[in-house]
Image: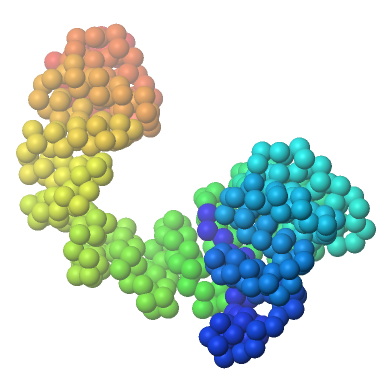
């Protein structure tokens, strides 16, 4: 799940970084104290520039050869690139073993090398020795476990920090994230709701809350959360896109179209957005309008699978089967492993009464994705038309096992059993069909006029 953070690291180079880079260019003096050098290293580290970090440390140790602070930074770099043995040697050699950063590095080192018991012992000992700022210390420790995807231990420290001070917003964001990773959805929602209670204008929390609701298919709640986020920051294109998706899921296609268009204007991203808009028009059964937007995408990307199938579906609905097949066949060329495209191909062929090739297309789709009850039922129907009743019955039963709510499925199974001369099962499924639809018996005898009504209905 994508999420946003309410806090941002300042990645702009500060004055000391600029002065160091001017020094490298021969435009400034070359003396920096240890604190300044640490600041430069941290800036490069945050930006993933580990080689530059090493260069700064080499330079710094020439100026300050006995600086444990810079040695600690080198251990941190080694640890970040996975060279744990060098990191251990440095940490064991320095005298400042009780320094806060050294303790955190040792926790990280032990957690990365599978020495979790030692890492946890040091972490809990560190917290026990503190009387203030416990929430931020717990957050620092939690970051270490989060980096190792150990969300359960991260949660323990975050919860402990939250008990010390319950309005640390940065900590709460991480706690909610960890709950999400552990699939503790209700806990994550509870934490995000606390964040917006403390700081109602935190749009990132509203967005993340919307994301959880969306993934839980609680679309009304998701829409409310996205609306709050947009009320705080109406230039947030990602939230606007998610709102449009939510409106689509709520079948509010008219408003979804407007939201998609607004997103396209804000983000200058029209390629995928035109497909979304096309699908909305398709759902509204405005097929000509849908085709227009699908074509907008094809003009930019002629092999866009979604646009090709979208036009194909619209033409199927307009019963222009021959033209529809041209688009669907192009879609299959783009992705021959897409099971849905083979279904659309089959439906177009059925429209042209080419049942043999339609059957082959349906069977290809099932080979790619066996869990398609509607497609299994369509295959069974064709076999019934071909008077291959035993094969048809097998496909009907497979479809029924996957989804016993398919319309008239019991009736079709009853007919298939009758055609296979299994009267007992035919009667059983006819009774099931009649319990669901009063016209089932009438339909059965229309399909099987030679059946003895007295025997079947007694």
Left or right of 141 in this view: 147: left
The answer to which of 165 and 351 lies nearer the viewer is 165
Residue 71 coordinates in the image, percent (x, y)? 71, 62
**Residue at the spot x=77%, y=40% of the render?**
118
Left or right of 106 in this view: 49: left
Above or below: residue 25 compared with residue 180: below
Q: Residue 189, located in which quarter of the rendered image?
A: bottom right
Above or below: residue 204 compared with residue 216: below
Image quadrant where one finds the C terminus: top left
**Residue at the spot x=71%, y=75% of the render?**
63
Residue 210 coordinates in the image, percent (x, y)? 57, 60
**Residue at the spot x=59%, y=79% of the render?**
12
Residue 444 coordinates in the image, percent (x, y)? 22, 23
Q: Residue 220, located in which quarter of the rendered image?
A: bottom right
Left or right of 107 in this view: 212: left
Using the rendered image of the protein, determine whether residue 438 is visible from the camera's viewpoint: no
Using the rendered image of the protein, determine whether residue 303 is visible from the camera's viewpoint: yes
Residue 237 coordinates in the image, percent (x, y)? 47, 73
The answer to which of 250 and 70 lies nearer the viewer is 70
The answer to which of 107 and 222 lies nearer the viewer is 107
Q: Number of marks in the image?
A: 0
């Amino acid at each position: 799940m994508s999420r946003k953070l309410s806090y941002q690291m300042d990645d702009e180079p500060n004055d000391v970084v600029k002065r160091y880079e001017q020094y490298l260019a021969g435009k400034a003096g070359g003396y920096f104290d240890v604190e300044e050098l640490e600041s430069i290293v941290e800036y490069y580290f945050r930006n993933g520039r580990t080689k530059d970090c090493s260069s700064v440390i080499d330079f710094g140790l020439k100026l300050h050869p006995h600086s444990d602070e810079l040695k600690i930074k080198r251990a941190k770099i080694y640890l970040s690139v996975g060279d744990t043995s060098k990191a251990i040697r440095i940490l064991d050699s320095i005298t400042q073993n009780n320094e806060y950063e050294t303790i955190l590095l040792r926790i990280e080192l032990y957690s990365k090398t599978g020495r979790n018991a030692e890492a946890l012992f040091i972490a809990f000992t560190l917290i026990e020795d503190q009387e203030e700022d416990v929430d931020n210390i717990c957050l620092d420790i939690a970051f270490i476990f989060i980096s190792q995807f150990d969300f359960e231990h991260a949660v323990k420290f975050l919860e402990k920090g939250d008990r010390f001070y319950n309005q640390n917003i940065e900590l709460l964001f991480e706690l909610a994230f960890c709950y999400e990773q552990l699939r503790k959805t209700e806990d994550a929602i509870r934490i995000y709701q606390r964040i917006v209670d403390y700081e109602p204008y935190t749009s990132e929390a509203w967005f993340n809350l919307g994301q959880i609701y969306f993934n839980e298919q609680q679309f009304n709640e998701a829409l409310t959360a996205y609306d709050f986020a947009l009320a705080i920051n109406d230039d947030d294109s990602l939230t606007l896109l998610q709102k449009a998706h939510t409106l689509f899921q709520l079948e509010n296609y008219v408003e979804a179209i407007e939201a998609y268009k607004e997103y396209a204007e804000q983000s200058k991203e029209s390629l995928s957005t035109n497909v979304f808009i096309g699908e909305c028009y398709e759902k509204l059964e405005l097929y000509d309008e849908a085709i227009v937007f699908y074509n907008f995408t094809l003009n930019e990307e002629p092999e866009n699978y979604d646009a090709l199938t979208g036009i194909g579906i619209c033409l199927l609905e307009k019963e222009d089967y021959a033209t529809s097949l041209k688009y669907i066949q192009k879609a299959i060329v783009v992705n021959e492993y897409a099971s849905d495209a083979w279904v659309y191909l089959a439906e177009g062929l059925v429209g042209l009464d080419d049942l043999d090739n339609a059957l082959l297309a349906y069977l290809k789709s099932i080979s790619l994705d066996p869990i398609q009850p509607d497609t299994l039922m369509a295959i069974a129907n064709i076999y019934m038309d071909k008077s291959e009743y035993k094969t048809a019955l097998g496909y009907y039963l497979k479809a029924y096992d996957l989804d016993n709510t398919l319309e008239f499925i019991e009736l079709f199974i009853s007919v298939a059993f009758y055609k296979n001369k299994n009267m007992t099962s035919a009667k059983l499924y006819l009774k099931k069909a009649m319990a669901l639809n009063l016209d089932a018996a009438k339909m059965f005898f229309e399909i099987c006029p030679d059946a003895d009504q007295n025997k079947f209905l007694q």
